[in-house]
Amino acid sequence: MTAIRPGIATGSSSDSTGGYVTGPLAPATRVLLACSVAAAPLFAVVSLAQAFTRDGFDLTRHPLSMLATGDLGWLQIANFLLSGALTAAGAVGLRRVMRGTPGGTWAPRLILVNGVTMAAAGVFVMDPGDGFPAGTPLGQTGTLSWHALMHMVAGSIAFTALIAACFVLGRHFSRAGRPGFAAASRLSGLVFALGDGWAMSGGRAGSLTLAVGAITAMVWISVVAADKRAALR
């Protein structure tokens, strides 16, 4: 009898109930999952390095998305595009290893939506404002540009999808008999939901709570991908 690790469905790569990916698809699946593992650390390191070094940026007042403006804005644009692409690739890998399990359809789909709309948020950048980039007048601009509006739409979809994915993963791990992972999934989604809600309500240091929530949820997805990758045989 073959031992089955909870949280990963069994079957060959050609079995519609899937889970463990064996044979020629396994190496490609490991690469796809590695993309997801790398996405959150990349986004967090590049974003926070800029947040603490770029003149005029204040994480308690400026969202990380605003780093895409100014002379060095291309760094954050590239960060959004690459992190989004890695997240989307990782979602394909997660779909392969979670096929046939509770949440195995919707969690990868939601993560894919998050990755695609994250990349879109890099294409459509925010407007400068509230003192950033340095030299920009304090306060918010009166009218949003079309690309800033598109950024808000893409960001809202990305946030919602990632929060939902965390709660779907909570169900996935709960049904698999892994209460620790289930609790961590739900807590990550809750932290992000609260951080985003506080920011959207105009709460003090809302951009900071949003950043903490987003990075927390992204890191958790990377942890899940690493766990699934380690379970491959």
Image (tube, rainbow, N blue to C red):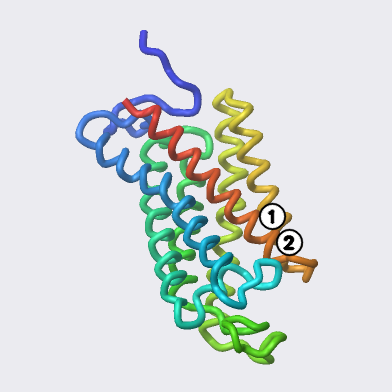
Residue type at tag 1: Ala
Q: Is residue 58 above or below residue 233?
A: below
Give the image location of residue 220, x and y in percent: 55, 43
Residue 218 in the image: x percent, y percent?
54, 50
Residue at the image point whose x is 36% and y is 32% from the top: 18
**Residue under pointer 1:** 193
Above-or-below relation of 93 to 69 = above
Amino acid on which the number 2 mark rests in the picture: Gly
Q: Nearer the viewer, residue 3 or 43?
A: 43
Where is residue 20? Give x, y as percent. Answer: 35, 28
Left or right: where 214 falls relative to 31: right
**Residue at the spot 60% in from the left edge and 67% down from the top edge:** 156
As helix, strand or loop, the secondary structure at mark 1 comes to: helix
In the image, taking residue 63 as reference, residue 123 lies left or right, namely left
Which residue occupies the extreme left position in the image?
A: 24
Closest to the observer, 75 or 200: 75
The quarter of the rendered structure image containing the C terminus is top left
Q: Quadrant of residue 168?
A: top right
Q: Which mark is residue 197?
A: 2
